[in-house]
Amino acid sequence: MSVRITALTDPEETPAGRRLAWLAADPDGHPVGSAFLRLFTKDGQRHLAELDVQVHPAERRRRVGSLLLDAAVAAARQDGRRAVISQAEAGSPGAGFLVATGFRGVLALTYARLPLADVDLAALTAVAEQPQTGYRLAAWEGTVPDELADTFVASRRAMDDMPMGAVDYGTVVWDLDRVKAAASAVAARGDILHTVAVIDRSDGSIAGFTELVVPGSGRGDAQHYGTAVLPEHRGRGLARRMKAASILQARERHPRLGGLLTDTADNNPYMRRVNDALGYLPTHTAHEYQLDL
């Protein structure tokens, strides 16, 4: 089958990156596949691109995916990228395709879901309200309040040593503009960003945070974006406490939500234990793959 690959104009551009797109069509002009390549543009990640290739099941093994991949890789090289990453569910056709085309597995992720109808409210409340000398919880919706902005930006370094396997992910540099842009991006698509933070009473600084994005409709499943505690505050149960408070807040404010989704690197056993203790149930495993250019 003759396949035509057409580059498309993709208007999606964020402060963190821009996206290229291609459409694969059969001789009659019917779409049979697509590819999207995100080019990260923030300092510390300009070497990296992220690829998503989709091929109609009936058109697989006909070089559609390979042609889309060739177009995307050529664009990444032309833009000076040194690595392309992509994700696929374990055992899926996509995983087989990536390995066959030269990608190597660099990170395993376990996805999990917490059904909100089944949570133990008493147990969660006990965790969220446990007395901890020297700390208190704070919470907000949307952009961080001005009085906490500087210390929240500083707390983002808690993500710097997040286990990322062998992914050449670079260094994500956070400043106040990026924090505000991330919150604005969530709001622009109609969703709601909830943040729970733990504050060190000794100086008022944020010691850790957890973020949850809720669909604007208040229905379906919400998605955890990140949970992290600064190294000097770890080992005190703060992540578990913050996440328990976040669950209770989501259930109270959005009673029509079905569940909360999270994903955790398999080489991050601490966060896996936190999720297990709070009732999250594994749903599937996926892998990050990387192609070095």
Image (tube, rainbow, N blue to C red):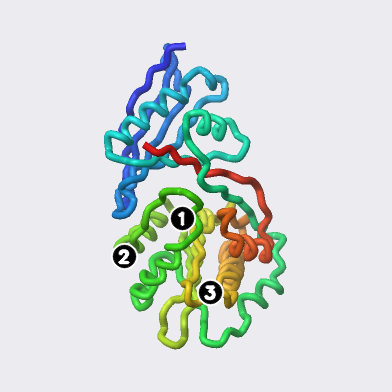
Q: Position of residue 185 (x, y in %)?
A: 37, 54
Mark 3, Cα crowd under 10 Å, few <14 / some 14-19 / many 20+, is: few
Of labels 2 and 3, earlier in sequence is 2
Residue kind at label 3, given as amino acid type: Arg
Mark 1 or 3: in front is 3
Q: Which residue is mark 3?
A: 234
The residue located at (48%, 72%) in the rendering is 231
Of residue 248 and residue 289, the one placed in the foreground of this image is: 289
The residue located at (41%, 86%) in the rendering is 203
Give the CA distance from mark 1 to mark 2.
22 Å
Q: Position of residue 115 (x, y in %)?
A: 67, 57
Mark 2 or 3: in front is 3
- The label on residue 101 is none
Q: Which quadrant is home to the C terminus?
A: top left
Mark 2 in CB contact with mark 3 (< 8 angstroms) = no
User: Is residue 96 visible in the rendered structure shown here?
Assistant: yes
Q: Quadrant of residue 251?
A: bottom right
Q: Position of residue 211 (x, y in %)?
A: 49, 63
Mark 2, Cα crowd under 10 Å, few <14 / some 14-19 / many 20+, is: some
Q: Which residue is mark 2?
A: 175
Judged from the image, the secondary structure of the residue bearing numbered disc 2 is loop
Mark 1, Cα crowd under 10 Å, few <14 / some 14-19 / many 20+, is: some
Give the CA distance from mark 1 to mark 3.
30 Å
User: Is residue 262 visible in the rendered structure shown here?
Assistant: no
Q: Quadrant of residue 141?
A: bottom left
Give the CA distance from mark 2 to mark 3.
23 Å
Judged from the image, the secondary structure of the residue bearing numbered disc 3 is loop
Of labels 1 and 3, earlier in sequence is 1
Q: Which residue is mark 1?
A: 191
Mark 1 in CB contact with mark 2 (< 8 angstroms) = no
The residue located at (43%, 37%) in the rendering is 291
